[in-house]
Image (tube, coloured by chain):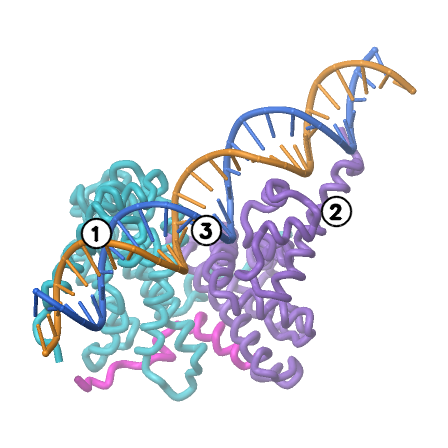
Chain colours: A cyan, B purple, C orange, D blue
Amino acid sequence: MDELPGLRERKKERTRNLIAHEALRLFREKGFDEVSVVEVAAAAEVSKATLFRYFPAKEDLVLHRFADHLGEAARVVRERPPGLTPTAALRAHFLDRLAARDPITGLNDHPDVLSFMDLLYGTPSLQTGLVQRYRSQEIDALAEALPDVADSTPLTRRLAATHLIVVQQELGMENWRTMAAGRTADEAYDDAVAEAERAYGQLMTGLDTVFPAGTGGG
Amino acid sequence: MDELPGLRERKKERTRNLIAHEALRLFREKGFDEVSVVEVAAAAEVSKATLFRYFPAKEDLVLHRFADHLGEAARVVRERPPGLTPTAALRAHFLDRLAARDPITGLNDHPDVLSFMDLLYGTPSLQTGLVQRYRSQEIDALAEALPDVADSTPLTRRLAATHLIVVQQELGMENWRTMAAGRTADEAYDDAVAEAERAYGQLMTGLDTVFPAGTGGG
DNA sequence: AAAGAAAATGCAACCGAGTCTCAGAAGATT
DNA sequence: AATCTTCTGAGACTCGGTTGCATTTTCTTT
């Protein structure tokens, strides 16, 4: 059994952080698509092959920053206090993170956070590539965390998980849009809470209480 | 004003179909990732550059097959009879397509349809690339088609649209899985109806009527 | 029908992401 | 110190996608 991380492991960790750090610096500076991986590799003083040994794809250089949030929704549901439904637990958790101005909610106007979100949400290739993949992972994890109730099928759980994750991530994007439009986090807080409550409420009560029957017009 | 399509247009249409046809033939035969675009171009007797003039990306060679279904959900909601909510309209439409064994529901065991779905859903790169993109387009279109009710925000509509499209597409995938497992469409029909009703019902009544409060266990 | 504008094509070079091979360097092990 | 393992750099390679240019094909004009 190996106890403490040897020199090799520490060096690997340092290299990994260095690469991601240089990558993010360049991406912010020039845009994701305007920076090639060789440029990143050069900035981190490693070879292109080495870069790909640490990160399976260019997108993952960005993922590194919020890798620790992976599976958070699943955890929240698993550890929810008695008396709370999964939806209620996730709602409460989001509101809590909102109050704390957690970057993951999008409601954070620190320049550092903001420029990162600009990169993440404002780059189409990242939006469709990375955000979608992150979403899938969250959904898979959450689907497993949902209770296996009487008349639920794998599909039922998967669908519920999707609905829940989508709400959370869309709320995050919406808050980012608000920040990107120039409002401060404190200014936007009340609206953000209202939107969150509306979005989760819509899930709890069902869509038909929100969107009505047709007008009959041709 | 040009009335009927000239020779040029007809030839372009023919070429376009030929390329997509050859592409699909090769993809089915050897798998999406095992066929290069130059191979497809050669089979269709055009140059690589020409292929990309007709299709912006390799994935779009596959999209061609169901391009006519684009915006279907949005249309269904727009043209729904009075008395039906958007959710109810989409539910009814899906059940109708299910009864007709429409390939888009996944409930179709014709070898031709089946091999296409195997390709589409069984290829990771297509799943994450194409299906996700198709989903986004459907969501965007549907979000615009949803009625602009009293306390709805752009986000509200976008979320509702996402929930609705996701249900439809996940039901499709689930039916494909059933087909891929060897059941016939007729055998699976009753179950497919039940799943669809459960999935849409879950949306109408809200998640909290399905997934209960926590158990309190650590 | 001939001539010229407009559009479509093929060719070839190019770019960037990602993989592979292989030789050599650096950490771990005795 | 010697060996064994792991990590790295260099470079060639594949593939998706783009670009510039010369050539051909279709449409239009007279």
What amino acid type is highlighted by mark number 2?
Answer: Arg
- Element assignment for label 3: loop
What amino acid type is highlighted by mark number 1?
Answer: Asp
The answer for which chain carries disc 3 is B
- Element assignment for label 1: helix
Residue B90 % position (x, y): 55, 65
Q: Which mark is residue B148?
A: 3
Q: Nearer the viewer, mark 2 or mark 3?
A: 2
Density class for disc 1 (Cα within 10 Å; few <14, some 14-19, many ≥20) is: few
The answer for which chain carries disc 1 is A
Q: Are marks 2 and 3 on the same chain?
A: yes
Query: Where B31 sits versus A39, above or below?
Result: below
Please provide the residue range marked out in magenta: B192-218
Determine the residue positioned at 67% across, 61% down: B25
How far is the residue under mark 1 from the one under mark 3? 23 Å
Query: Where A153 sits versus A56, above or below?
Result: below
Residue A155 % position (x, y): 45, 77
Q: Which mark is residue A190?
A: 1
Task: Determine whether, in the image, residue B152 is placed left or right of residue B32.
Answer: left
Query: Where A204 sits versus D9, above or below?
Result: below
Farthest residue, direction bottom: A150
Residue A115 % position (x, y): 23, 43
Q: Main secondary structure of the magenta part?
A: helix
The answer for which chain carries disc 2 is B
How far is the residue under mark 2 from the one under mark 3? 42 Å
Q: Quadrant of the C terminus of chain B?
A: bottom left
Work out whether mark 2 precedes mark 3 in sequence or the reverse, and give the earlier one: 2
